[in-house]
Amino acid sequence: MSEQAIVIVNHGNFENDFLEKIVSRIHQEYRLPVTTEEIHIDLSEYYDPTRRQYDGNRLLKGLDSKSSSPHIKKIGLFRVDLGIPILTYIFGQAPLNGKTGIASLYRLRNEQYGMEKDEDLLLDRFKKVITHELGHLFGLLHCHVPNCVMISSTYVEDLDQKGHNLCSKCRTEIVQDYSQETENLRKLSNNFNI
């Protein structure tokens, strides 16, 4: 596997067709190879019974330490309710310029809000969350350009209103940063005759 790959870690027993659609979307947006990996983590150690949620901060650290596959970025996909101390819930989380992020579809389901089940809308929302969290991993802050996938989303309605893609400003930032990082790695490998 290429160290330049984005790895999608399947922890939520997602169907192959569902994962293939996510892989396709991420590849289309970031133009890097995308692979999948299945990992089973005992989520009970991340469960907070007082909140009846899973601690996103601890789960993120746990996932970061689990995978040994070479990758440029990794994002774990879950089906559980995630929270962090400063927010009631989160759709996903990723540190700026980090290597690992997480995303959960738990709060993205229409049934969560008393509405009719809609699998297409669920997939659409989840792809946006994953694309957004990967943006943070690639160094992007929240964007203010209308329709950019990097606009902050507190509610599912926010997800439904924003687009699927990075705006030209965000795309340019990633290309410039990634090009610089690649050039630095090339120079480093030349210096050490790697």
Image (cartoon, grey):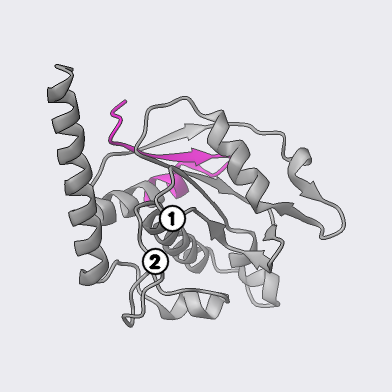
Q: Which residues are magenta?
A: 1-21
Q: Residue furthest front?
A: 191
Residue 164, horizontal then vertical, whole percent:
34, 68
**Residue at the location (55% across, 58% down)?**
92
Pick out the residue farthest to the top.
Answer: 193
What residue is shown at x 63% (from left), y 31% (from top)? 40
The tally of labels here is 2
Give the amino acid at mark 2: Leu
The percent coordinates of residue 127 (x first, y second) are 43, 59
Does the magenta portion include 138?
no
Gap between marks 2 and 1 measured at Cα: 7 Å
In depth, the one of 6 and 184 nearer the eye is: 184
In the rendering, at what x and y percent does residue 10 appear? 53, 40
Residue contact between numbered discs 2 and 1, judged by CB atoms under 8 Å: yes
**Mark 1 is on which residue type?**
Leu
Kindly identify which residue carries mark 2. Answer: 141
Looking at the image, residue 156 lies above or below residue 93: below
Label 2: which secondary element: loop
Figure check: 114 above or below 189: below
* Horizontal relation, residue 177 to residue 6: left or right: left
Quadrant in which residue 29 is drawn? bottom left
Give the quarter of the image for residue 182: top left
Q: Residues within 10 Å of mark 1 (few under 14, many from 20)?
A: some
Which of these two is toward me, 192 or 15?
Answer: 192
Quadrant in which the N terminus is drawn:
top left
Q: What residue is drawn where x is 46% and y is 77%?
A: 160
Of the numbered discs 2 and 1, the one sitting upstream in the chain is: 1
Query: Circle 1 sits on which residue?
Result: 96
Position of residue 157 measured from the top left corner of the image (x, y, whole percent): 53, 80
* Viewport quadrant of the C terminus: top left
